[in-house]
Structure formats: C-alpha cells, structure tokens
Image (cartoon, helix red, strand yellow):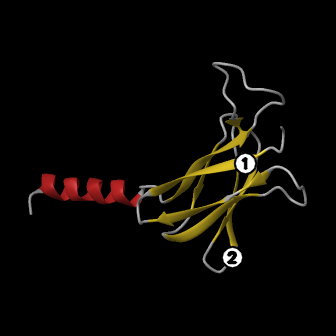
Amino acid sequence: MHRGAIIGIFLLASANASAATGVSGRVMISPAHPGPQRIGESGSAPMQGASIRVFDARRRVVAHATTDADGHFSVIVAPGEYAVEVDVGAAVLPRCGTAQASVKDGQVADVELDCDSGMR
C-alpha cells in the first residue's frame, strides 16, 4: 500500500474516533415576564443555569449539565435512547417537560425543552 494512502486512512480513523456522540439542546421558559406581551417582545427566554439530567432506558442518571446564558447545554453519552429533563427539585414551578433523544454513534442528538414559569 502507498505510504500516502496509509497516512490518509490513519487521519480518517482519527477523525472518526474523535467525533462527538451525545445530546445537546436548549431550555426555554415562558412566559418570561409577568403581564401582557408587547408587540415585538418575545414571550419566552433562555433558561440560564438550569440543571439538566440525562436518563438511560433504566431511568438511571447517566449525565448532568448546566445551561449557559443562552439556555444551551451539551453532554457526551454513548449511543442509545435517553430521556432529558430539567431538574427543578421539589419546586412546583417551573414545570418542564421531558425530551426523548435517540443518540446514534458519532452523532449528537438535539433536543428542545420548554418550561412553564407559571406567570400569568
């Protein structure tokens, strides 16, 4: 085999080995402020500092993350099926749903989580 081909195969294998596998997403909360929504004003906002838990099929926590200022998070997990939730502890509000993520080898599954702040 040609030396250049061997180097090319090595580089390709290295690139595939470093491909991220996991879950990323964004958490939004709405309404973001009390009172009526004004024209041109968004009713939702990124949920900064939210604690994220990722559960495997057996409901075991396999990863944790905290959202950034834009409500984004990212975790590395093995390929598989996962449930992603915002950990609100014992608090009644906000109420947040659960997102399902199907993670394939070498891919990052993207999820959106919406939380109800309870403001009206």
**Residue 81: horizontal and vertical position, in percent?**
53, 71
Image: 20 above or below 39: below
Residue tagged 1: 115
Q: Between disc 1 and disc 2, whose residue precedes?
A: 2
In front: 94, or 12?
A: 94
Residue at 14% over, 52% down: 4
Residue at 62% over, 66% down: 83
In front: 101, or 17?
A: 101
User: From the viewer's perspective, is the residue at label 1 or at label 2 nearer?
Assistant: 1
**Residue 92: horizontal and vertical position, in percent?**
88, 56
**Disc 2 residue type?**
Arg
Q: Which mark is residue 59?
A: 2
Name the image quarter holding residue 98.
Answer: bottom right
Residue at 78% over, 26% down: 36
Name the side, left or right, on which 56 lies relative to 102: right
State the separation of the CA atoms marked 1 and 2. 21 Å
Q: Secondary structure at mark 2?
A: loop
Q: Secondary structure at mark 1?
A: strand
**Disc 1 residue type?**
Cys
**Image quarter of the N terminus:** bottom left
Name the side, left or right, on which 38 lies relative to 103: right
Image: 63 above or below 47: below
Name the image quarter holding residue 58.
Answer: bottom right
Q: Decide: marks 1, 2 in contact (CB < 8 A)?
A: no
**Image quarter of the C terminus:** top right
Name the side, left or right, on which 103 lies relative to 26: left
**Residue 34: horizontal and vertical position, in percent?**
84, 30
**Residue 2: horizontal and vertical position, in percent?**
9, 58
